[in-house]
Amino acid sequence: MAMLDIKNLTLEISEGDTTIKALDKVSLSVNSGEIRALVGESGSGKSLIVSAICGALPAKWKLTADRMSWNGENLLSMSTQQRREVMRRDIAVVFQNPQTSLDPSVTLGEQLEESIPEEFVKGQWFWQRAKHRKKIAISTMHKVGIKDHNTYLKSYPHQVPSDIGQKFMMAIALVAQPKLLIADDPTRGMEPTTKTQILKLLTRLNQTRALSVLFVSHDLLAIASMSHTMTVLYAGQTVESGKMKHIKKRPLHPYTKALLDSAPSFRKDLPPKSSLPTLKGSIPTLQHLPIGCRLGPRCPRAQRECVVTPSSRRIHDHIYSCHYPLHREVK
Amino acid sequence: MTHIMQVKELTYCSENNGNGKRGFFRLGPINLNVDKGETIAVIGENRSGKSLLAKLLVGAIPADGGDIELNEHKYAARFAKRNEQKKRTRDIRMILQHSSDSMNPAIPVGKILDEPLRLNTDFTKEERKRFIEESLLKVGLLREHYYFYRHMLSDGQQQRVALARAIMLEPKVLVADEPFAALDPSIRSQTVNLILKLQKEMGMAFIFISHNLGIVRHIADRIIVMENGNIVEEGKTETLFRWPQHPRTKKLVMAYSDLVPKQSLNE
């Protein structure tokens, strides 16, 4: 059963007298115990979805959805109090940029200890509790792979390198033992060894504690190695979603195929230095979104019908929205 | 095979303020030969001195010692004279990591591209303009982009402008610091293709730093592995990926292949 279930999420931003649909009928669900990857290039609205789930969007942006629920409870009609409770205990978020999302005026240690829920801390007296709190903080740091806890507990966010900051964000997110972790591009700019470490950590937590992960990224290599299911976004529309295995083996949407082709590591038969297959053009900006299927102008298979937004179709649990998917012949 | 660039005993020490105090980061001594038309990838952990090496090669940071020989033209890496420096700016060009940050937001693309020409060539104004338009076409932009400002361009286009600026003076060697890191997958492949094409046309050597071992494996002829400011391993791409020798290389290659093997497409 889906823990997080989002259906037809639409986000409209009004600027003066024009309205932009930044997200257009996005559907996404995360089942318990699965790692779901959310793939998309920059400007596809990945981070907007993350903000929408945690309720961090500006109030004047209009957010509508047919369904947006967490364990059966509607997130949109929830009171602020309830929502905050859910966000504190059940859903944890690792934001994109550690340097800007950590509090610059407080040491990392204090920030980490602050996010430990009271009921985890044992001890009757305040000194016992403080001691236990510190113990939890240190063991969490070790878990995410920070070895030198003494230095980093006392340092401020600007003093630590960005990969440590990233791991710290993870530690803060994981210390409350959430049921769902939303990781917004947690491996960006990391070197391969650290990246593998982080991915292994997520996989391990997923297996041992049945933590569900929503992994938001455009690093296909990382995604393909760990996630079970994948949702592909393009310019605010869900393009394809389904099991990782199926999508990798037989992508149905032209965009997914282009995305998979763009990573040379996926293909063993590619001769070195040959040119990579690409889609022409670049990602449209929010102000100049094409109508209908937003891939339209860049799509090699586009036809006249593509100016109408394609409805999503389903083959078993593989959902795609395209008028001319790859398994069908184009006339 | 003739080397077009030879680097001998290049050293650098941070915090070296002339009074004999030795700092905490030492680079080198580094020896490196670059052949014509060759692609060399530099890989390594963060803080291993990769970016520093790139900056030393182009002369953005003066080195403490050593020689860089380019096309039978010798530059003492330490005491760069002005006219030598000028020759060097023509022969080695660089693409910086954040191409958008390296462009002046207040002047249009044409002006940005005009600057290196004005400083390094004797072209007249009209010749320069024509030349810039040709370069823009070469990297897959349009003539109109001459009048565009930075904020009007997308990431990929900005990268193209940075590339145009780098290849305009027809350098022998192009140095790039993580040119693909900030790009999205589809734009990244476009850039890779473009660089491959230009390299084939112009026959320049290309030295680049990257974390993306998939791309490294795809386009590099040779790989240099760095750790703590030293080159710890150097070799042909396939050899290095198949039989890594140094522990650092092993670690990097392992980390990469950990992600790869499960994903042959036709399983």
Image (cartoon, coloured by chain):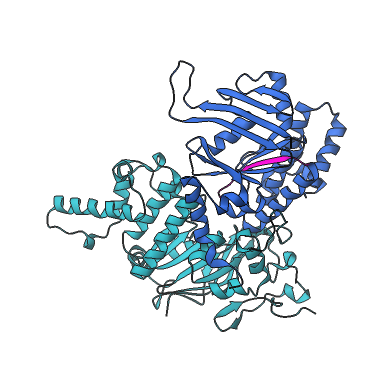
Chain colours: A cyan, B blue
Q: Position of residue B12 (x, y in %)?
A: 53, 27
Q: How many marks?
A: 0
Residue at point 68%, 63% (across, down)? A289
Q: Position of residue A187 (x, y in %)?
A: 49, 54
Does B178 sit above or below residue A233? Answer: above
Q: Is residue B161 shown left or right of residue A238?
A: right
Residue at point 67%, 23% (across, down)? B75
Q: Would residue A207 be visible to someone looking at this image? A: yes
Q: Which residue lies most toward the bottom here?
A: A316
Displayed quadrant of residue A20? bottom right
Q: Quadrant of the N terminus of chain A?
A: bottom left
Displayed quadrant of residue A118? bottom left
Does B207 sit above or below residue A330? Answer: above
Q: Is residue A71 shown left or right of residue A254?
A: left
Q: Would residue A61 be visible to someone looking at this image? A: no
Q: Which residue lies most toward the left here?
A: A124
| Viewer-closest of B48 and A150 | B48
Q: Quadrant of the C terminus of chain A?
A: bottom right
In the image, is residue B208 part of the stretch drawn in magenta?
yes
Q: Position of residue B83 (x, y in %)?
A: 72, 20
Q: Which residue lies most toward the top here?
A: B19
Does A103 sit above or below residue B27? Answer: below
Q: Which residues are magenta?
A: B203-212
| Viewer-closest of B230 and A48 | B230
Residue at point 48%, 63% (across, down)? A215
Q: Position of residue B58 (x, y in %)?
A: 64, 31
Residue at point 84%, 29% (across, down)? B123
In the image, is residue A11 part of the stretch drawn in magenta?
no
